[in-house]
Image (cartoon, grey):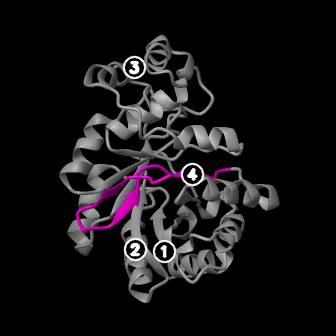
Amino acid sequence: MAIPHLTAADGTTLPAIGLGTYQLTGSEGAAAIGQAIAAGYRLIDSAVNYENEGAVGRAARSAQARDELVVTSKLPGRHHRYDEALTTIEESVFRTGLDQLDLYLIHWPNPRVDLYVQAWRALIEARERGLVKHIGLSNFLPEHIDRLVAETGVAPVVNQIEVHPYFPQQEAIDFHRAHGILVQAWSPLGRGNDLQQQRTVVEIAAAHGISPAQAILAWHVARQVIPLPKAASPQRQDENLDVFGIKLNDQEVEAITALGRPDGRLAGQDPATYEEF
């Protein structure tokens, strides 16, 4: 199954869907990730704080398609200082057992600590050393991104943020598109809430003969957002991947977007104040 790609301002291309791997750990996790790669996933998302870089690396090393994979990890907040950040990136590469990581992100800006510019300089250096191929961000607000670009001259290829129908993030998406930064969505299906039972979603899914989850993922695809759904079972992995033939019309996209709420964040994690170490 050929997955479309989206292109950032610098020409970097990323698959239009990826696999979230949070809680996919150990041998079972490695097997589930390997199965997803065999099914056609090429973008694999991980993080130091997920404690599964080893499982991700094991699956990637076993795959026939290593050169097609975009294996991702993220720098935790406790290691934003320049030297610590570089060492942490090296350890991420070592843990995966790969020659380099394809994409490395800063997990959260932690603005009160105010070391994210140091962390970004470390990611730039890691890219220059060949430890990582591409660099980006996660949970950064436009003002954080503007500051990074102003102080380093280097823009991220991607920002991974919370996006789902209860929190559509239209303004943020518009900002990223204007700057040629790709958007990845974490918790794209809303993580265990009632989103898939919403009447709007159910009716649109029924009209297309698809599942509610597929309707939501097709909404992401229509907005040129890269969803990262987590799934361990082969059935769910296949279903989540099979969304590129689904074409929602503008009214359907707008109807799902209209489910957005002012308090739509799943856990109130506002990057302006939330910190993760």
- 197 vs 144: above or below: above
Which residues are the magenta region?
A: 1-22
Query: Do the numbered discs 1 and 4 sit on residues whose CB atoms are within 8 Å?
Result: no
Corner quadrant of residue 40 = bottom right
Say what amino acid the circle numbered 1 marks.
Answer: Arg
Query: Label 2 is placed on what type of residue?
Result: Gln
From mark 4 to mark 3, how far is it between C-alphas?
24 Å
Q: Nearer the viewer, mark 3 or mark 2?
A: 3
User: What's the mark number on residue 262?
Assistant: none
Q: Which residue is mark 4?
A: 19
Q: Mark number for residue 259?
A: 3
Left or right: residue 6 compared with residue 264: left
* Disc 2 to disc 4: CB gap under 8 Å: no
Q: Are marks 1 and 2 in contact (CB under 8 Å)?
A: yes
Which residue is located at x 58 percent, y 20 percent? 194
Q: Is residue 21 above or below residue 229?
A: below
In the rendered image, residue 152, in percent from the top left (x then y), is placed at: 26, 74
- Cα separation between marks 3 and 2: 38 Å
The earlier-in-sequence mark between 1 and 3 is 1
Q: Are marks 4 and 3 in contact (CB under 8 Å)?
A: no
Name the residue type under label 4. Leu
Tell me, yes or no, whether the highlighted magenta stretch contains residue 21: yes
Using the image, tell me which numbered label, if any, was put on residue 81.
Answer: 1
Q: Which mark is in front, 2 or 4? A: 4
